[in-house]
Amino acid sequence: MIMITYGLIEAYAILTGLAALMQWKEKGYQLRTLFFVLLSTSILLTIWIPYKEWILKILIFEFMMFHLLAIIEGQLTNNKLRYSHHIIRFIIHCILLLLVSKFIKY
């Protein structure tokens, strides 16, 4: 089950990073896009941290940063927020964090 959880997190990070790279290619360099790529890369690296106690804390921070970037992106590109998108994204992040917390022993 832990492999499935980490696989889901890796897939999420890779897809988000690829979407940011595609946006970078289409719209040119933007600092927000760079942050999405860096954050996706950091999530991929976080999974491999040998100290399991740190993984959950760092993932919580990274997912919060993803939410902030998504809100900023929505405001700047569409001049409005799609609340359903952010609620679904928040639910997915919570599910992933619950799965990770299940396997971490304090």
Image (cartoon, rainbow, N blue to C red):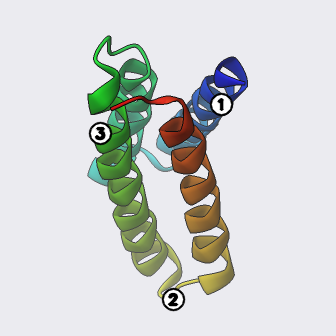
Compared across the picture, whether 30 is left or right of 80 comes to left
C-alpha span from label 2 to label 1 = 33 Å
Res. 58 mark: 3
Res. 80 mark: 2
In the picture of the structure, the residue carrying the numbered disc 1 is: 5
Neighbourhood count class around disc 3 (C-alpha, 10 Å): few under 14, some 14–19, many 20 upward: some
Q: Quadrant of residue 22?
A: top right
Q: Amino acid at mark 2?
A: Lys
User: First in sequence: mark 3 or mark 2?
Assistant: 3
User: First in sequence: mark 2 or mark 1?
Assistant: 1
Q: Is residue 29 above or below residue 80?
A: above
Compared across the picture, whether 52 is left or right of 4 comes to left
C-alpha span from label 3 to label 2 = 29 Å
Residue appearing at x 27%, y 31% in the figure: 54
Residue appearing at x 68%, y 81% in the figure: 84
Neighbourhood count class around disc 1 (C-alpha, 10 Å): few under 14, some 14–19, many 20 upward: some
The local secondary structure at tag 2 comes to loop
Q: Is residue 89 above or below residue 96?
A: below
Q: Amino acid at mark 3?
A: Ile
Residue appearing at x 40%, y 76% in the figure: 76
User: First in sequence: mark 3 or mark 1?
Assistant: 1
The local secondary structure at tag 1 comes to helix
The local secondary structure at tag 3 comes to helix
Give the quarter of the figure containing the N terminus: top right
**Residue 94: image x %, image y %?**
55, 58
C-alpha span from label 3 to label 1 = 16 Å
Which residue of the protein is positioned furthest toward the front in this rendering?
Answer: 106
Q: Nearer the viewer, mark 2 or mark 1?
A: 1
Q: Nearer the viewer, mark 3 or mark 2?
A: 3
Neighbourhood count class around disc 2 (C-alpha, 10 Å): few under 14, some 14–19, many 20 upward: few
